[in-house]
Structures are given as C-alpha cells and as structure tokens.
Image: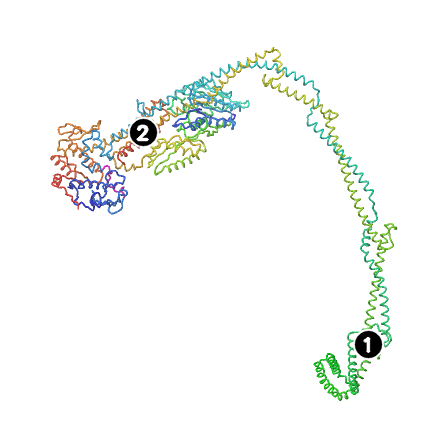
Amino acid sequence: MQIDNYGKYSDRSFEGLSRGVNVLFGPNEHGKTTLLEFVRRMLFGFPPGTYRKNRFEPVNGNKPGGRLVCELDSGEELIIERSGWTKGGALKLNNIDAGQRELSDLLRAGESFYHNVYGITIEELYDIQSLNGEDIKNRIYGAGLDLGGISLAEIKKQLQVNADRIFKPGGHKHLIHALNEKRKAYEQQIKNGAEDLKRYEEIAAEQEKLDRDREILRDRIKKISGLNEFIDYENLNGKLKNIPGTPVINEDDIEEYQEIATELKTVTAKLAENRAKQLELQDKFKNTRINPALPGLAPEISVLERSSERYRADSQRVGELAGQIDRLAKETDGASANIASLWLEGEISEDFNFTLEFISEINEFEQDFNDLRQKRITADALLQQQAHRQKTMPGNLLPLVFIGILDLLMLAAGIVVNSLVVIAIAVLLAVPAVIAAAQSFSGDRDEDKNKSGPLEKKAAEIETQWMEFLSRNGFRDTLAPRDLLNCAEIYKNRLKNRNDLAALKKELENKKLWLAEVDRTFEKVATAFDKKILAADILANIEIVSRLFRENEKAVEEHGKIAAEMKKSEAAAALLKNKTETLETAAQAILDRFKAKDLKDLRQILAYCRERDKLNEELEKSRKRLRNIFGLNTGIDEIRFQLENFSGENAEDKETLERELAELNTQYGVLKQERRNLVSGDKLTALQNEHECSVQQIRDYALQWAGYRAAEFLINRAVGKYERERQPEVISRAAGIFSKLTGGAYVNIRKPADSDDLLLVGANGAARKVLELSRATREQLYLAMRMGLVEQYEEKTESLPLVFDDILVNFDKSRLDLAVEAIFEFARQRQIVILTCHQNIHSLLLKYGAADIQAK
Amino acid sequence: MSSVKFIHCADLHLGSPFKGIGNSNPELAAALAAATFTAFENIVVLALERKVDFLLIAGDVFDNADRSLKSRLFFREQLEKLDAEDIKCFIVCGNHDPLSSWSRSVGLPGNTFIFDSAKPQTRIVERGGLEIAAVCGMSFGSAKVSANLAAKFKRERSDLPAIALLHANIDNSSEENYAPAMLADLEKGNFDYWALGHVHSFAVLKSAFPAVVYPGCPQGTSPRETGVKGCCLVEIKNGSAPEIKDFAVDVIRYAELEISINGVKTFEKLFALTNAACKKLAAENGGRQTVVRLKFSGRGVLNKELRAETANGELTEHFEQEVEAFSEMFFLNRIELATGDDYDLEELTRNSGFIADLTACAEELDEEDMEKIKQAVMEVYKKCRIDAKSFDESSLPGIIEDAKRLALDKLLEGSGK
C-alpha cells in the first residue's frame, strides 16, 4: 500500500502486508481511520467535492493518490493506482488506464457493501447499543443489503404515509374521500337533474291548456276587432266601385305626352325658320349674275394675261428690227461694191475663204516690203542727213538743243530772279552740250554711202513673189499686201453683216407670227364680251378681259355656295318634317291609349287613377288587418260568413279580453322560457360529465394508491426472499463464528419465520433475543454476522481485504482471545488488517502471528 | 330479388359522459359533450348524401336511463331530417337504453320504428310503392337480457333481402347479460345480413351468407376506445353478398403519446420531443380533435423534477399549453408518469442482493399477487361505488412498474445514491 497523498499521509508506504492477519499499531490521531478510508477510496474512488463527510483531503494540498498492490485468488498480481479528485480519480489497473466499471466487475462488491461489511469501525459497534430490536435487525440485515445505513422500516413508513394520503380505509382525511364526496354530490344532482324531463312534460301540458284558452280569447277579440274593420273594408269597396273605369294612367304617361308636345312645338318652329332661309337663298342665287362663256375661255384668257407684257415689247421690237435690217443691208451692199474690184473677175468670189494661213502669208509679204522700205528709207535718210547737216543742225543734236533751250530758260530765270547760282548752273550745262554736238556732227558720214545697191535687188525679188501670190489667188496684181489685208477685213465684216441680217429677219418674222397668234386669241376671247366695252388697243382689252374674267370667277363661286346651302337647308327641312310626323303620331298614340282627346282629358284620367289607387291601398291595408285578425289564409267571404251571425260586443269587453289574453301570454312565455332552459341548458349531461370526471380522478388516485401499496408489498416480498434465500446461509455461517467468539456459550442463531427478531441459542438450548444480550455479546454477534456475510458473499467472488478499526476494544481478556483465534481462522483464506491503538491487542495479535505493519 | 342500400350503426351513446377524463378543461368538456351528437349527425348526413333506403340503429342510442332532454330532442331532430327525405329508420334497444327507458314525452317522427322486446318483428321497407327489404328486429326489454334473442329470429320473406337487427353479444361467454349467442345461431336464421350492436369496434364476424357485422360505435367515449370509429354503408344487390364499407364519422379520437426521458437532460428537449410527437399524431388523425394522454417513460435525470412539477400542476399546465398550442384540435387529457431515476438497474442488481431480490420479486409476481393488487384498487372502487367492471386490467403491469420504481427510488434515496 503506497499513499502518495491522502489526509495526513504523504509519500508513505506500508510494508509487510500479507495474507492473513496484519496489525498496524498507532496511538490516537495516528491516522488509522485515514488508512481505512484510503483502502475504501482506492477501491471505489475518491469522493466528489459535494461529499458532505470528511474527504480526507491531503494536508499538503496536493491531489490525492496512491496504489495498492494486490494478490488475487489466482495468485496473479493486480496493481490498483488512483490519483486526483476528478470522477473518483484517474484509475490504472496494472499500469493501464481503466474505468471504475472494470474494477467493480473484478471486485463484484458494491461500495456500500464493502463499507458496511469489510470496513468496520468501532463507532458502528458503539451505535448498536442505542438501537432497538427492529433497528438491530435492519442494521445487521441492512449490512447485507448493500443499501448503506437505510432503514427499510422507514422506507415502508414513508410509502405508507404516501398511500394513506391518497386513501386510508375508514379514514376521512385522504384525497379519495374528498373526491368521493364530490362524486356523490354530482350523483345526487344527476338524480335531481332527471326531474327535468318530468317538468318538461308538465310544462307541455300546461302550455297545451293555455293554448286552448288563448285561442278562445283570440277568437272573441278577433271578432270584435274584425267587425269594425270589415265595415270599413266594405265602405272602401263601395267608394272604389263609384270611380269610372278608366285605363290605368300614371304621371309618367302624362309627362311623356307633355314632352312629346313640347318637342313637336320646337320642331315646327325650326321648320318655319328653315323655309324662310330657303327663300332668302333663292333670292340671293337669282341675283348673282355670271358670264357662262367665261369659265370655258379660262385657258385663252390666262394666255392673254401672260402675253400682255411681251406683246407690248415685241410690237416695239418689230419696228426696231425693220430699221436695223435696212441699215445692215446697205452696209453690206457698200462693202461688196468696195472690194469687188480687187478680184480679177471684178466680183467677189463668195466661195473664197480668208484663212488664217492666207492672212499670215500676206502679213509676211507686207513685213518683207516694210523691211525693204525701211532699209531704203534709212539709206535715203542718211543721204539726206549729210546734206541737211550741212544746212541745219543734225537731227541727232535735238537733245542738245533741248538742253540748250533749257539752259537758256534757266539763264533767263536766273537773271529774272537775280540768282547767280541758277546762272552758274546754266553756264555749266551749256559747255558739255556744245562739246557733244561738235562730236556728233562729224561721226556717221562715211558708212551710209555703201548700202543702196543689194537692197534694190531684194526688192525686185519680193515684188515678183507677191505678184505671183496675187495671181494664184485670183486677185489683181496691183494690190499691195496692205490692200489685201484691208480687203480681208472688209470681207470678214461683210460676211458678219450678212449673217446678222439673216438673224434679224428671222427674229422679225417670228415676232410677227407670235403677235398675230395673240391677236387671234384675243379675237376668240372677244366674242364672249360685249364689243362696246372693248377698246381699240389690244393691250387695254386684255386688261379689261382679265378683270371681267376674275369678277366672273368670284360670281361663279358664290353661286356654288348658295346652291350647296340651299341643298342642305332642303335636307334639314325634310328631316324636320319627318320628325314632326313622328311626334304627331306618338302624341296621338298616347291619347288613343287612354281614349283621351287632349292633355286635359289625360289629367282627368290620372286623377281617377290616383283616387282608385288610394282606395285600393286602404283596402289592402284593411284586408291585411282583417287577415291579421282572422288569419292569413282566411278569405273575405269566410270573414263575412264568420261575422254574419256575430252581434258584436262593445269596446270595453274587448279591452278586458285583451288584458286576459296578455296575462295568459305572459304565463305561456314563462313556461316557454322554462322549457327552453330545460332543453338548451343540458345540465344533466354537464353533471354526468363532471361526475365521470371525478370518477376518473378517483380511478387515477386508486392506481397511485395501489402503486404505493404494491411498493410496500414488493419490499416485504424482497425482504422475505432475502431472509429466506440469503439469510439462512449467512446466519448459519455467522452462527459458527458466533459460537467460536463466545467460546461455545452460544451454539446457534435462529430466525423464526414469523418474526423479524433473531434468537440466540445458548449452550443450554435457551434462546435469547438480541436485546437480552450484553453489549459485548451483541458486538460479538455483530462481528459474527459480518464475517458470516463475507463468507457467504465471497463464495462467488474475489476475496477482499477486511479492515477492522479497533473493533476488539470492548472485549475482555477471554473474549479477546476467542475473537483473535476466530479472526485468525477466518483470515486463512483472506487478508485482515487490524488497526489498533491498544498495546495489549497489538501484542496479542503479534503473538498469534500477525504481520506487524510499519509505515515508511 | 330487389337491391337495397342502407346504413348500419349502433352504440351512439348520445350524451354519454366521456370516461377517463381526469380534468375539467371547459373547452375539452364542450368538445366532448358535442362529440357523440356530431358523430350521429355525420351519419345522418352520410345517409342523405348516399340516398340510402333506410338507417339501422342496433341499440344503445342513449348511454343510460338518465338521458338528457337535449339528447332526445337532438335525436328526434336528426330523424326528422331523414323523414323529410323519406328515409326510414329502424331501431332496436340495447342494454344501455332498454325499451322501458324510452319516454313517450319526446315523440319520434313517422319514419322511425322501434322494435318490440317481446318477440322479433318484421317490417317491410318500400321504395316508390315497391317492397325492397324485410327488416327483422327485437329490442332489449331491460338492461340485462340473458336469453339468446338471435335464436328467435326467423326470415319471413324469401323474395326480399332479409336483414336482422339486434343488440347482442356474439361468441363471448364472459358477457352473459347481453343477449348472448353463438355465430352458429345467427347462421340458422337464414338472413342476408345481421346488423349487430354492442361491440364498440368495427368487426365483420362473417362477410356473407349471412354477413354478420358490428359497425362499432360512431364516437369513442373513453381512452380505451382508440382508433377509427364510424358506421357501415351496406348494399345488397339482387341476393348477392352484401357490399360493406365502413365510414369514419368520429369527431374526437383518443391517443396516447409515450415519450421516453432516457438521455433527455432538459425540459426544453422534452417539450421538443412532445411537439414532434404531436405533429406526427396530427398527421395520423387527419385534423380531428384529439384527446392526448402523455405518458413519460424511461429513466433519466429529469425524473425527480418531472414528478415534483407534475405533482404541483405547473408542468401539467405547461405541457397542456405545449400540446394545445400545437393545434387547437388537441387536448391534453392527462400526464402519466412511468419514469424512474437515472440509475443503472443492472449494476444495482449486481451489487445489491436485496435490490436483485426486489426486482426479481417484481418480475415473479403471480396471478394471485396481481389479484391482491387489483383487490386493493377494488377497495377504492367499492368505497366510491365505481363499477368494478370499469377497471382496466391492463393497468396492473403499470402499477407493478410504478411500485418497483417507488421502492427503488426510496431505497436509493435512503442509501444516498
């Protein structure tokens, strides 16, 4: 046994433990109980925090733990290790994690059983003294019940109390009694409720009698009321018959007639308006004059209107054209006369064409002639200059002359203005001019003398070529190039004039034709007009015609409009006429329907109808009143029949009768209400349900009660079974041990079948009850019973170590010896650890061979 | 042979107080009070819809002699509806409403005929002036009839479908006061159809030649009468075997929901389980009003609290809300506790010889022991004038189980376990 931490022990091992008896000696507070508790806890787990007794928490504050090295019956070794508080402490079996279930399966003993049987303390022995017989029995048997220190008697008592609370035969304070009282009350009410039917039948009979009485009264009241009413009815009927028979008319019919008449009036007025308007239109139509021929001449008039301006222009142009044609004809003829002599034949060749190439050739000839002339002139001039130079200042001194003039002018001006400067400049300019004039005059005189011979030759060649050219082209050879060129020009102009002339003639002809066409058109249009209104000028006439045409157009349009309006008016008139006829027919139909002549008649008929309706209404009311009095299905003839022989009673009688009837009605109403209550209330069913409900509650409680009773019954049965099947063996074994413990003073223990008490049989055969034994003997009995239980229990299970905590302390010397002997004998098959603080017991046990346990 | 169509019902028990209801919930009381009436109304509606030739009622129209006026008037009103459509009604009286108990103060319409109790009578049914069936019947004259009434029945017309109408106990020797007869007796009568009453469950004892049928009651009136309740629509065509269809007409059904507290650690979970069970039940009952008996079983940590709270009524109220909140058609009748503490009985048995003996004793109880326990209950019944026959023998095992639990709880409580 190794204690790591537990109570006051810490890292402590107990060595020398072996099979058989072991003794651990120590004074009080040595920790013997701690050791006993340690063994219990190692086998069944450390208690949880909620454990109310001493948990033996390690004083060093560590978690509890330790190990037991055990030897099983088979010789195998089992190491049980446990540590910590959680779930009883972590358990290991042979160093393997295990659950409590595995260990419990191995031990096959419950914690309570072990606590009560295997671990016995001196306190439990002390307790025995204060217990009565029943308690002792329970304590002793209870040890074997593995139920801790419970009292079966207490349990049974509790069950009994619970059962009695529900039901106790003969009692009056239980639940079922109260429920039964309630049930009985309902039962009584149900019986009373059954009276409803009888009352219902009584009411029916009373109502029947009341019905008869009420009927008689009603009949009398009816006839009193009915007589006057019937007279009224007959009077009304007479009045009704006096009203003439007419068709039935109502306000709506009159209103309809009036509406038709009003509409007819309106329509007639509209028709008159329409007729007046038609006349007006007819007048207007007639008064609107038109020229019927003009619309057909619209294209011609349109042409004339468009031609007016041109006509004026073209007329003027025709005059102009005649003049131009005349002038051009003269010019052309003159030109022809001028150039006709240039041709060899003396007349113009009309086919000749002055081409550009021809003109170019003439120009070349002219250029050649000009060049020759120029050269000849130049040569002639040089000769003349020579001659002239001698007489006059050469010609090329002109600038110098100019300068000289200018110089003179300046000189004169200088003198006039009296300016020396101007005079000086004039002098300075004169000097070079004089020098230059002298040089020019003497220069060109010699070179011009050698050029006149070849020039003449060349001139002769060109002359020849020119004359050939003229002959070749049909011209006279006397013509100079310039003449031919002029001829070409004239020819060209003449040709142009001839063309222009043709064009002008054409234009003149066209215009004349167009003017003639316009004239013809006008002639056609003019036929539609009175000649008197026309002027002599066609252009003025066109204007007149155009204006009249426009006016006529407007007149035609106006005419159309009036015609359309007249047509529309005629159609409206037709409709109005038609409507008038319809309305007249409808109005007449209404009059016919009611056979009336006019509205007045209709109103009279309506008055009759109203009167008749009023009377009918009153008659209907009267008839209803009669029906109310005599019954809905009673006809007037039947009423008349009933009243024929009724002399009538006065109004006072009627009031008395009505009071009597009201009284009877009240009585009837009360009965009716009572009957309705009886029918609708259904009190009986409600009571039956309540009754059934209370019965069911009793049934439910009866089951509960039976449950408590059966629980008690089961416990008694189980105790009996336990005593019968388990206890005899325990008692038999305990008896043997008890005999040894008492040194044969007691030889047997008996358990009578009809009693819970034990009888201890002495050597002399006398039997004593437990309470008759001395305290020490009772402790011996108690010890013997425990050892008997262990023997009986371990027949099927592993032997477990027993721990006796100073249980021998109250034994005297002889009893102690006997107890030790018995314990040693008992310990042959098992291990017993005896904890003691008494030296004598320790010594005695050692003497008998107990192993002395030392803590290290 | 002509064809005929009729409805066969029995054991209406109109206005019968509902048995087995331990509380007086006003809504439930109202629903239950109306249930037998509505169930019969359903039969009448069925008869009108199917245009039957007649209605047969095989006894026990009323529950007892203390019948209410409302019941009588209601019954007459329903028969008048049939009368208006020219549907005949034939009635025989049963042990709950013997002929002597019928009062003449509330008369019945002309279409209704109640058979005499002296001897069987035969009535011919006509349709459009033609005879279509012969109904033979005999009523109970008093609540106890030990004679074999069925043996007295004889077919009088072979040319018409023959129907026998009787309240009787067939092939059950234990009930000798309810016109006991054997099936063989019925076969001798040569009828086409035996319309019986008395047994509250639908049963076809013989399907043809003759057909022997109990339609069951239209509405169960105690928790023991669980399941579908209704009537039979029968058609006999030209002498062939009757076509029998059973129709559910009941309004309220009884149901027991057993919920185990094994492994259930919180009431929320328990409520959830209850809710789920209600849902399943609602689906099964097709929207009918249902009186639920909650039975908690198993062992678990909730046991003690469950018992304590149930005892003081708070929990019952909560479960009532749980059940009734689920559907307005649900009513909680009662809570039955068959639960125990959360202990390992096997281990306890192994560890304690006494507990092993206790459980063994509970299992070894014999008939004699059962009788003793029953007699204990009977003691209460006798004291409170409750009919001993109304004791449900099947509740005995429950008592034993309860007793075992009580004993174990007390033993373990005392031992500090």
Give the extent of the magenta segment: A99-113
Residue A119 sits inside the magenta stretch: no
Residue situated in front as seen by the camera: B351 or B174: B351
Mark 2, residue position: A707
Whether B37 is drawn above or below A510: the answer is above
Q: Count up the numbered dots.
A: 2
Q: Is residue B139 left or right of residue A317?
A: left
| Residue that extends furthest to the right in the rendered view of this protein | A532
For marks 1 and 2 on the same chain, the one whose residue lies earlier in the sequence: 1
Q: Residue B300 occupies which quadrant of the picture?
A: top left
Q: Residue A574 occupies which quadrant of the picture?
A: top right
Mark 1, residue position: A484
Whether B22 is drawn above or below A209: the answer is below
Q: Amino acid at mark 1?
A: Leu
Chain under callout 2? A
Residue situated in front as seen by the camera: A489 or A676: A489
Instruction: For label 1, count other residues whose C-alpha is less than 10 Å away and answer few (under 14), some (14-19) or many (20+).
Output: many
Does residue B357 appear in this view? yes
Circles 1 and 2: CB atoms closer than 8 Å: no
Give x and y (percent) for residue A397. 75, 84
Q: Secondary structure at mark 1?
A: helix
Mark toward the viewer: 1 or 2: 1
Residue situated in front as seen by the camera: B160 or A506: A506
Instruction: For label 2, count other residues whose C-alpha is less than 10 Å away and answer few (under 14), some (14-19) or many (20+).
Output: many
Q: Secondary structure at mark 2?
A: helix
Residue situated in front as seen by the camera: B329 or B81: B329
